[in-house]
Image (cartoon, helix red, strand yellow):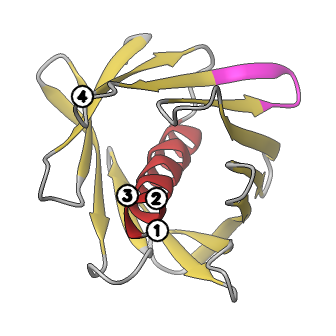
Amino acid sequence: MSEQLTFSKDFWSSTYEVKDGAQVLVKTEKKSIWSYDSNVRIGDKEYFFDVTGLLSDTVIIYEDKDKVIGRININFWNTEAYILLENEGKFFFKQIGLIANEWELHNEEGLMIHFSKSLFTNDGTIKIYHENNKCLAIGIFLISIYQQKSNNS
């Protein structure tokens, strides 16, 4: 995997793809148009994001359908999320700036992944500072849920 990736979403689709050149590395799939629940496939692993809570602000992360590997607490007001992954520790995801086109994912040691989306399309770039497939999957899921939530507002 290179340090610079791209991501895109077709206008009418709810599916994001992350690519390294022409090769698709990550693909998200929504369970339904009305739900925030998603599946994210990265390599031979599949992660399931089960969104719960009164404000759809709690996410349970499953690996391969049955193994709970973490939890996300989302703050939609501040556009940030706190992530706890079993055996890997705590992570923090936040929007950078006011126009909702850049996000960062940090661990306790610093910046891991920077996501930047075009203002006029659903395409963007991903800069990897510390490779972690689970964190890449979580970042793409969070971008998709923030975009869906802002489109429904």
Residue 83: image x %, image y %? Answer: 75, 53
Give the residue at mark 4. 19
Within the image, what quadrant is residue 12 found in? bottom left
Mark 3 falls on what kind of element?
strand
Measure the C-alpha gap from mark 2 to mark 1: 5 Å
- Is 134 placed left or right of 42 in the picture? right
Residue at (32, 24) in percent of width and height: 118
Mark 2 falls on what kind of element?
helix
Q: Nearer the viewer, residue 139 or 124?
A: 124
Give the residue at mark 3. 40
Give the residue at mark 1. 153
Mark 2 or 3: in front is: 2
Residue at the extreme bottom of the image, as rendered? 54
Give the residue at mark 2. 150
Within the image, what quadrant is residue 38 found in? bottom left
The answer to whether mark 4 and mark 3 are in CB contact below 8 A is no
